[in-house]
Amino acid sequence: MTVFANPVLPGMYPDPSVCRVGDTFYLANSSFEYFPGLPLHSSTDLVTWTPVGHAVDRPGQARLLDLAGVPDSGGLYAPTLRHHDGVFFLACTVVGGAADASFLLTATDPAGPWSDPVFLEGARGIDPTIFFHEGRAWWAGCRLVEPGAYPAQTEIWLRELDPVAGRLFGQEHILWNGAVTGAVWAEGPHLYAHDGWIHLLAAEGGTERNHAVSVARSRSVTGPYVGNPGNPVLSHRQLGATARVQNVGHADLVEAGDGSWWALALGVRVRAGGHVLGRETFLAPVAWESGWPVFNPGAGRLGERGSTPFTSADAPTPAELHDTFPPGPLAAHWLGVRGPVPGAHTSAAGLHLEAPAPPPASTAPAGPTPTSALQPVTGTPAAFLGYRLRHPDVRAGIHLVLPHPGVTTGLALRQSGDFGLRLELAHAPAGWAATAIARADGVDTVLGRVPIGPVATGSVLDLTAELSAAGVEFAVSVTGETRVIALTDAALLTTERAGGFVGTLVGPFVSGEPGHPVTVTAFDYVPLP
């Protein structure tokens, strides 16, 4: 038996999709504009999740998916992970590029290598799923009804899939519009066979406070589907604004080897009316009653704690991280915005991060360009590497070598290109200074500035950000002396204020003159009691 506390996968790991191969469960999550994309984990107990890689981890894949052209909270949405005849299949959509497009990736090992994306003609909409049943393969997705009976009305549609050729064929079938008339965005469909029925699980209500999970069933894959009279079968929307966990929905089911069933769903942990960590992965047991799935029987909502009857083959991932950036490939927990960070590399001295050159005016795209596509952290092009915030109370910091005076560097808490907080180190005629800055709606506001006096070239400085119920406190340490720069609330880091679908990343950035890399000797992440 393994005892767990929800969420089982904390931090920005939304839209969970799970499958089982033997005694091992595999999990995929959305990654939006971040690279590497579509993180994958494995577990033998549904509680202890070990990273195994990313399905999109090559620059060539990022180019084919046009990640460079997606806006904030665009990119890779709601994957579905399935396994059939020795092959892993991953269906997903890239949103916000030249055109929304659904694609298929395959691998024989979830650790990779994964194939280049195969785009499916006719796969309109988002949130595709794959269903293997009785020797046939099916592809279902979600799209807006045109014209809809009400705004944001969607439909779940289905066609047969040739998984080898990567194409859809045959008649299209409209399966469902969701459980509640007027509820927006029936999405995230998944199909399962159980006890002679085909069950269609879907999210609806939008991925905010009204998010929910509903289910319908049919004797045939192609329908007709009839909704459960008890819908929605999982939601926290009825709990009100004081609930600790909210926005619950977008679930996937998996049957364990012992015949038990489990659900992984997304939810958010709320503090002071908002959430900064993004949508996280939660676990719940599922029972079958009168031919319908019942989530967390006797409670009907996600539990704060629980247990599974399985044991783990892996040690839990340490909550703390002390990354000294050893020589070799950059650790996979570091994310870039819309692709790999050019020039970022490691050596015996640590991480080397260089400011990018501004794009030539002649290559600027025609028409409006999202500010964040060219300005991921600051008001000028910046190189940024981010680590997911996974705890509501945490201290994160970098140790960096005093840089060249022509660059600005520091520690950023990135919610989007237009919203975030940062502590930056810059050189002015009066000397070096550390400045705390809030960025809201694309506009920077100085929260506090402290000159740090004469500092010898090659000195190592510590820049820290501490997140707690009090807000975010920025501090700088030089030659053993620590000075607090500013204390501000964390509202700019919440989805409720910034919008979008992602959580907060923390990590180093650099902007200014190219050709002068900044050396970060270590990164520390320490959860607070």
Image (tube, rainbow, N blue to C red):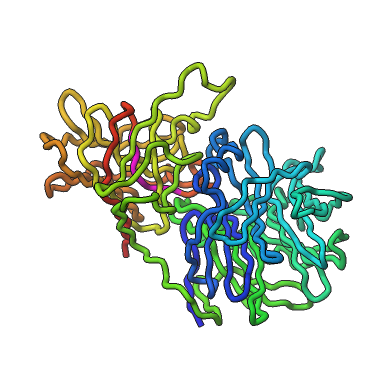
The residue range painted magenta reads 504-510
- Please state, as top left, top right, bottom left or bottom right, where the C terminus lies in the image: bottom left
Q: Quadrant of residue 198?
A: bottom right
Q: How many marks?
A: 0
Q: Position of residue 455 (x, y in %)?
A: 12, 37
Q: Nearer the viewer, residue 237 or 351?
A: 351
The residue sitting at 49% across, 63% down in the picture is 9
Q: Is residue 294 visible?
A: yes
Q: Main secondary structure of the magenta part?
A: strand
Q: Nearer the viewer, residue 518 or 423?
A: 518
Left or right of 161, for residue 49:
left
Q: Nearer the viewer, residue 332 or 224?
A: 332
Q: Nearer the viewer, residue 371 or 68?
A: 68
Q: Quadrant of residue 200?
A: bottom right
Q: Is residue 395 visible?
A: no
- Determine if the magenta segment contains residue 290: no
Question: Is residue 110 shown above or below 408?
Answer: below
Q: Quadrant of residue 137?
A: bottom right
Looking at this rendering, what residue extends furthest in the top direction? Answer: 362
The residue sitting at 49% across, 67% down in the picture is 49
Q: Position of residue 422 (x, y in %)?
A: 34, 40
Q: Position of residue 427 (x, y in %)?
A: 21, 29
The residue sitting at 38% across, 47% down in the picture is 506
The residue sitting at 66% across, 62% down in the picture is 87
Left or right of 280, for residue 468:
left
Q: Position of residue 468 (x, y in %)?
A: 34, 55
